[in-house]
């Protein structure tokens, strides 16, 4: 999606960072006093979500720059840390929770690389392993083409040894990262799906082939990798298709380069359903066999989740028996039946992931 | 626009012209006839002179009751009415028709829809909302008027189903956005069952979702033999038909959940803990927590039930339930 309108918060200084974005976008910025003008611009559209994808607002992050991932107590969480560098996305995935999460959704870039650096310094000085990602509220690399932020982050993380940076994406925007000295502290992660789902539900994203080729290119530059099968969508013969994706991963990259693979089936806040039905009329993904989960999100009926998980995990293990595979937000029964164990203690899953991070990214093992 | 009070001959009223009839109450007029005999006519009907006859604007039932009371007389029955000016417009007559009823009692939803639809021939939705206190004796928001107009476009027997309570406002609003063929499907279903609003919405939801999932028309879902058998069973109570239809649709919409739930319920039923002790499956079979419940009026009952539970520890089927 091409950004056609650029708003900039008047409180932001027009420094090199901002000038770079303006020049890359080639758009005439509108400097605004507050968010009202931006909200009105978006809300006046017939499809505010689509409008928001074409409207960039550069502002300051007025909340926490670093925060813990908002897991729920009913399902096991991975204790991830979110680096809040922006919100929303230019791509248009039907299942994207961000459509329902923000009111209204606004594509925001949080300016201030110095502030970001200072906040990270504080994290880097702690005696603890951190797995930090920017891909929770936005796609990490949609910004690569227009801003210096991804490059800044890779270089900043390269100078320390207690934190891993995960840049999660569905794009192939890697060019500016290739020549960087990352010191193995950056993991570039791709959300993967079957070509069927990418074609029908992930509008504006790179193809599976392109994503895996990009993964291969960054691997050749020494970057570590991660893959996220999330959301997995259940449809006829999906098991075969997901196994083919697994097979293709290992045709493109070495298992040793992969820090982890996460898997999770499609789950959604009930209000997302109406958004999908309105904005993606061809989509049938809301019509699976969903039940209301304990966290009040719609989830596939548990036996269906277990079945697809078992298939894909056994397939991954065929190629890479020692690879760290984990679930995002699943319960004891699912872990036991699919992985054969359950990280029961609080922080146990996080610890397993930390260990993998230390091993792959040369982090300080004394902090484990 | 003052109407004149006068007596006219019943034979001069065109009883077949119901263009201003907005009330759905075609009920038994015996009580009204008795009231007219004992008390007399308190509120005279309103009529409009048209083509040497009179047509009724308000008071259809009063005129029917008056005829009923005087049925032995073939000719010359007179009735006291308000007669509009000969140049009264259609719009003025419609306003009189609606207001005379709305200021007697609250209009039913079906009447409100019908009146709004007729008014829309003269006013837009904003004007209807603005004038609503004077016409309807209540304020109607513009959005609500828009909804009424949408629903007013439903074909027959849409309004009748709303009047009888077979079709709720929300359900009517939901189906009014669908295609003609699909609307017909739902009107047919709701004319054969009697369901609460939530159940109606669930039925609409399931049919639409099955249709979207399987890429077939809602009519094809509706034509399913099992559904047709349920709906066409004239011996079955509409409430039972609703139950069966919901179960059938749930099975089609969630076949795997349905079968799994059925298996668990069969297991639970086979356990037979006795003493009115109930086992409930985990919610949506998503957690692993079964619930056991019983009630006790006194300590002795409590003790007896706990003992039953204790005995059940060796129940093989109970053990199986917890080791799937």
Image (cartoon, coloured by chain):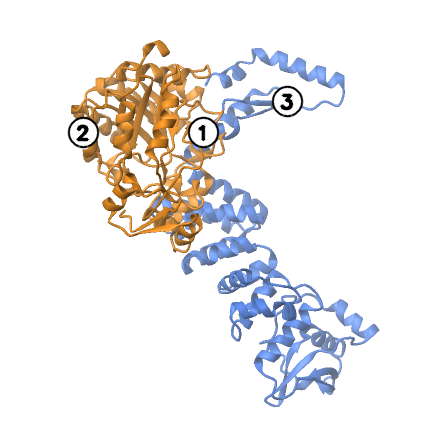
Q: Residue furthest right?
A: B38
Task: Using the numbered discs, state the Cα–Cα distance from disc 2 to disc 3 in whole angstroms.
Answer: 67 Å
Give the label on residue A70, or none.
1
Q: Mark 3 or mark 1, which is nearer to you? A: 1
In this view, the residue in front, B101 or B92, is B92
In this view, the residue in front, B51 or A20, is A20
- Please give left or right for residue B94 compared with residue A120 in the image: right
Residue B16 seen anywhere in this rendered image of the structure:
no
Residue A224 seen anywhere in this rendered image of the structure:
yes
Disc 3: which residue: B277
Q: Quadrant of residue A92?
A: top left
Secondary structure beneath label 3: loop
Disc 2: which residue: A178
Figure check: A145 above or below A229:
below
Query: Residue B8: horizontal and vertical position, in percent?
Result: 72, 86
Q: Kindly indicate which chain is depicted in blue in the rendered structure.
A: B
Query: Residue A83: horizontal and vertical position, in percent?
Result: 37, 30
């Amino acid at each position: 999606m091409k950004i056609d309108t650029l708003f900039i918060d008047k409180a932001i200084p027009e420094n090199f960072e901002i000038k770079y974005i303006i020049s890359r976008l080639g758009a005439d910025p509108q400097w605004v006093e507050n968010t009202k003008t931006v909200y009105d611009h978006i809300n006046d559209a017939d499809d505010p979500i689509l409008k928001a994808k074409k409207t960039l607002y550069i502002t300051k992050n007025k909340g926490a720059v670093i925060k813990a991932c908002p897991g729920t107590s009913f399902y096991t969480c991975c204790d991830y840390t979110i680096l809040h560098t922006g919100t929303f996305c230019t791509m248009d995935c039907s299942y994207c929770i961000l459509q329902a999460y923000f009111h209204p959704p606004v594509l925001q870039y949080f300016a201030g690389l110095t502030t970001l650096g200072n906040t990270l310094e504080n994290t880097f000085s702690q005696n603890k392993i951190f797995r930090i990602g920017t891909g929770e509220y936005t796609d990490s690399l949609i910004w690569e083409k227009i801003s210096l932020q991804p490059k800044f982050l890779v270089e900043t993380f390269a100078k320390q040894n207690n934190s891993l940076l995960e840049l999660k994406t569905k794009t192939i925007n890697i060019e500016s990262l290739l020549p960087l000295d990352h010191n193995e502290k950056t993991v570039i992660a791709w959300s993967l799906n079957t070509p069927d789902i990418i074609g029908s539900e992930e509008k504006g994203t790179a193809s599976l082939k392109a994503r895996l080729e990009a993964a291969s290119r960054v691997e050749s530059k020494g970057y570590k990798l991660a893959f996220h099968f999330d959301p997995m969508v259940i449809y006829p013969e999906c098991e075969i298709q997901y196994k083919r994706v697994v097979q293709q991963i290992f045709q493109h990259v070495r298992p040793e380069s992969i820090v982890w693979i996460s898997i999770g089936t499609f789950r959604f806040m009930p209000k997302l359903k109406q958004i999908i039905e309105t904005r993606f009329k061809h989509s049938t993904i809301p019509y699976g066999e969903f039940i209301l989960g304990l966290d009040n999100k719609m989830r596939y009926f548990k036996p269906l989740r277990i079945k697809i998980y078992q298939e894909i995990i056994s397939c991954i293990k065929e190629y890479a028996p020692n690879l760290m595979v984990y679930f995002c937000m699943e319960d004891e029964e699912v872990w036991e039946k699919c992985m054969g164990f359950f990280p029961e203690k609080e922080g146990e899953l996080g610890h397993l992931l930390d260990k993998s991070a230390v091993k792959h990214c040369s982090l300080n093992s004394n902090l484990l | 626009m003052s109407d004149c009070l006068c007596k006219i001959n019943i034979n001069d009223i065109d009883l077949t012209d119901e263009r201003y009839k907005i009330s759905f109450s075609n009920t038994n007029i015996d009580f009204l006839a008795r009231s007219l005999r004992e008390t007399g006519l308190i509120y005279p009907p309103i009529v409009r002179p048209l083509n040497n006859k009179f047509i009724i604007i308000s008071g259809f039932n009063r005129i029917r009751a008056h005829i009923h009371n005087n049925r032995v007389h073939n000719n010359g029955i007179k009735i006291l009415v308000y007669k509009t000016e000969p140049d009264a417009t259609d719009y003025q007559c419609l306003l009189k028709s609606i207001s005379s009823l709305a200021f007697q009692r609250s209009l039913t939803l079906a009447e409100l829809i019908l009146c709004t639809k007729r008014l829309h021939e003269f006013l837009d939705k904003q004007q209807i909302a603005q004038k609503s206190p004077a016409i309807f004796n209540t304020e109607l928001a513009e959005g609500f008027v828009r909804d009424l107009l949408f629903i007013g476009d439903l074909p027959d027997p849409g309004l009748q189903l709303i009047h009888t309570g077979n079709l709720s406002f929300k359900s009517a609003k939901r189906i009014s956005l669908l295609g003609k063929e699909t609307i017909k499907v739902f009107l047919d279903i709701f004319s054969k069952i009697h369901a609460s609003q939530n159940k109606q919405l669930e039925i609409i939801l399931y049919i639409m979702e099955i249709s979207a999932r399987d890429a077939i028309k809602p009519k094809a879902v509706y034509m399913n033999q099992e559904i047709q058998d349920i709906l066409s069973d004239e011996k079955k109570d509409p409430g039972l038909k609703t139950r069966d239809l919901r179960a059938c649709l749930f099975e089609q919409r969630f076949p795997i959940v349905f079968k799994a739930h059925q298996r668990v319920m069969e297991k639970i039923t086979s356990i037979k803990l006795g003493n009115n002790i109930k086992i409930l499956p985990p919610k949506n079979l998503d957690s692993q927590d079964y619930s056991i419940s019983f009630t006790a009026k006194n300590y002795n009952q409590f003790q007896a039930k706990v003992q039953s539970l204790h005995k059940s520890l060796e129940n093989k089927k109970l053990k199986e339930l917890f080791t799937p």
